[in-house]
Image (cartoon, rainbow, N blue to C red):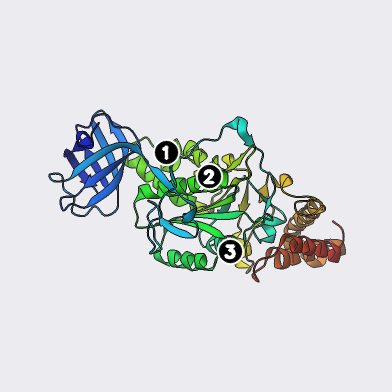
Amino acid sequence: MRLAEYRYSTVRGIRSQLLFVGQVEAVRMGEVVQVIAPDGRELEGEVLAVHANDVLIQVFGECRGLDVQHTTVVFGDAIKQTPLSPTMLNRVFSGSMHPLDEKPMFVPERWWPAGGFPLNPTLRESPREFIETGISAIDGLATLVKGQKLPIFSCAGLPSQQMVADILKYARTPQGNFVVIFVALGLTHHEHAFYMRILEELDTHYVAIINLAGDSVLERLLAPRFGLTVAEYFAFQHGMDALAVVTDMTNYCDALREISSAREELPGRRGYPGYMYSDLALLFERAGRIKGRPGSVTMLPVVTMPEDDITHPIPDLTGYITEGQIVLSRELHQQGIYPPVDVLPSLSRLMQHGIGQGLTRKDHRQVANDLYRQYARGSDLRGLAAIVGREGMTGADRRILDFCEAFEKEFVHQQSGRRPILDSLDLGQELLARFGPP
């Protein structure tokens, strides 16, 4: 069918970046459209909702100058595609996959749907092997494993931005065939400038997809899908280990709520759509490995918990889908501990598949268990010390309290930069030896 047969000039209303078009036939959800402004400008959009012959369209870009009389919408009967090529390495793109680094657009080797290809469960391979982040509290006690999805739960005001920057700089695998896919959602100009400086310093391969706070809301939903499609391409076509770092999933979920409201859908918990769980699962479940292929997709999303509430729908649903969590502590941050990782509620359910002889070190599990045990005992004793004081406690109990303080200030705290996994294990052993067996 010719393109002219999909051309409509029946725009009935314009609200911000939303277009209401009537008398449309043969259209589908998610279809990519072209919006031609009265002055000849061409904008891209996507179908958000279809009601009989009425269609709701989200426009990417500035809608100033559009009107209902002279705006034309062209339907192309195609879904959003991701351009892919090895030459996109070390490049920065917008949430619509347009270059942001003042370099020309690369020539795509192939195009894949932005939604990616669902992994056949029978071909999935269990996550295994270890990704070093350079952060002791993660590498030593909640190890990130290739093919895993491990979120970072943060709160407003905590240094999750600096922690993401450190992971971008320090993350690597022993094999070295590694690429970081960085997806940033709803950035302010200050945050954008900060991350651009970090990307310029990276000595590993990366692809960055940046969505600014003033960009289209729909781009905020597309950006992580583009990023994961890029990760799948390098993992399963080029055999690389791809680490997808996405910040911040709270901005993604807020965009999902805004789009749901535009569609006039019934709200669920706290106004978020009832399908938010399945929508997040469609993203997170794209992490994994495929039998017989060397590459992997690992996902490290950042979730800023609204009102510091871990039971809020966003972290709550994220925890159901993912395999553990890294929790940041406001109390540790106030003490000047960086990164302020709260060790006790943090865990990696797949840690045992990435550590041990031939992966990290033979005694890794034992050292981690001993550190957890000693720190958990000390955390309990801190409550008692607040009541009776240190003077009313036994010498053994005071020794455990001293271990807790040293553990936080020497093991968790590491503002000096990257710490290799063997150094982290050595430091843990040294702390245990200094304060006695757990």
- Nearer the viewer's eye, disc 1 or disc 2? 2
Q: Residues within 10 Å of mark 2 (few under 14, many from 20)?
A: many
Nearest the viewer among 24 and 140 is 24
Q: Earlier in the sequence, mark 3 or mark 1?
A: 3
Disc sitting over residue 339 in the figure = none
Q: What separation in Å lies between label 2 and label 3 (alpha carbons)? A: 21 Å
Q: Which residue is mark 3?
A: 169
- Secondary structure state at the residue bearing disc 1: loop
Amino acid residing under circle 3: Lys
Q: Residues within 10 Å of mark 1 (few under 14, many from 20)?
A: many
Contact (CB < 8 A) between labels 1 and 2?
no
- Nearer the viewer's eye, disc 2 or disc 3? 2
Amino acid residing under circle 1: Pro
The picture quadrant where one finds residue 122 is top right
Vertical comparison of 195 with 290: above or below: below
Nearest the viewer among 403 and 194 is 194
Residue 394 in view (yes/no): no
Contact (CB < 8 A) between labels 2 and 3?
no
Vertical comparison of 268 with 302: above or below: above
- Secondary structure state at the residue bearing disc 3: helix
Residue 284 in view (yes/no): yes
Left or right of 1, for residue 93: right
Nearest the viewer among 335 and 63 is 63
The picture quadrant where one finds residue 163 is bottom right
Q: What separation in Å lies between label 3 and label 1 (alpha carbons)? A: 36 Å
- Secondary structure state at the residue bearing disc 2: helix
Q: Earlier in the sequence, mark 1 or mark 2?
A: 2
Name the residue located 56 percent from the left edge and 43 percent from the top edge: 236
Q: Which residue is mark 1?
A: 273
Name the residue located 40 percent from the left edge and 50 percent from the top edge: 220
Residue 49: x %, y % from top left? 31, 35
Name the residue located 19 percent from the left edge and 37 percent from the top edge: 8
